[in-house]
Image: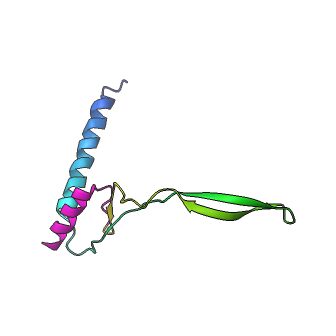
Amino acid sequence: MTDDTDPESNLQQWKETMQAEHDDAIHNPDPNATHRIEGVSQVSYRVSFDYNESSGSLERASREQVDDLADPELLSCVCGVRGMTPEEATAHIEAARE
C-alpha cells in the first residue's frame, strides 16, 4: 500500500488553516475573556566576576547594561492569542472593545 498524499500540499494546507484560525482569533475575540496585550523583551548585561580564593568560586563583581529595552516584535493577549504583530494586537484589542 502506498501513500499518495503530497507532504508539501498537506503542509501548505495546514499553514493556511492555522493562519485562518489565527486571523479569526485576532478579529473575533471571545467577549467573555479578559484581554490585555503582553510581550517579553530582554535587556542584555555584561557581567564581570571576581574569583574568591577562600570559597573557590566566582562572585559577581559588576554588571553593565549593553543595550536598551526594546518593544518585542511579537505580542500575546492574556486570552490565549499568541504571536501577534503590533498591528494585529491593536486590531485584537479594538475588536474586543466593540
Residue 85, percent from left and from top: 27, 55
> Hey, which quadrant is residue 63 in on the image?
bottom right
* The magenta stretch spans residue 88: yes
55 up-or-down from 73: above or below: below
From the viewer's side, name the closer residue of 62 and 59.
Answer: 62
Task: Please give the name of the residue rendered at 87% of the width and 66% of the height, measured from the top-left corner.
Answer: 54
From the viewer's side, name the closer residue of 68 and 26.
Answer: 68
- Secondary structure mainly formed by the magenta segment: helix
What kind of colouring is applied to the model shown?
Answer: rainbow
Task: Please give the name of the residue rendered at 28% of the width and 42% of the height, measured from the top-left corner.
Answer: 15
In the picture, measured across the screen, residue 70 lies left or right of residue 60, that is left
Residue 20, percent from left and from top: 21, 50
Task: Please give the name of the residue rendered at 23% of the width and 75% of the height, measured from the top-left corner.
Answer: 32
Residue 76, percent from left and from top: 33, 62
In the rendered image, the residue lying farthest to the left is: 98
Specify the segment rendered in magenta: 80-98
* The magenta stretch spans residue 87: yes
In the picture, measured across the screen, residue 61 lies left or right of residue 77, that is right
Which part of the image, by quadrant, shows the N terminus? top left
> Hey, which quadrant is residue 26 in on the image?
bottom left
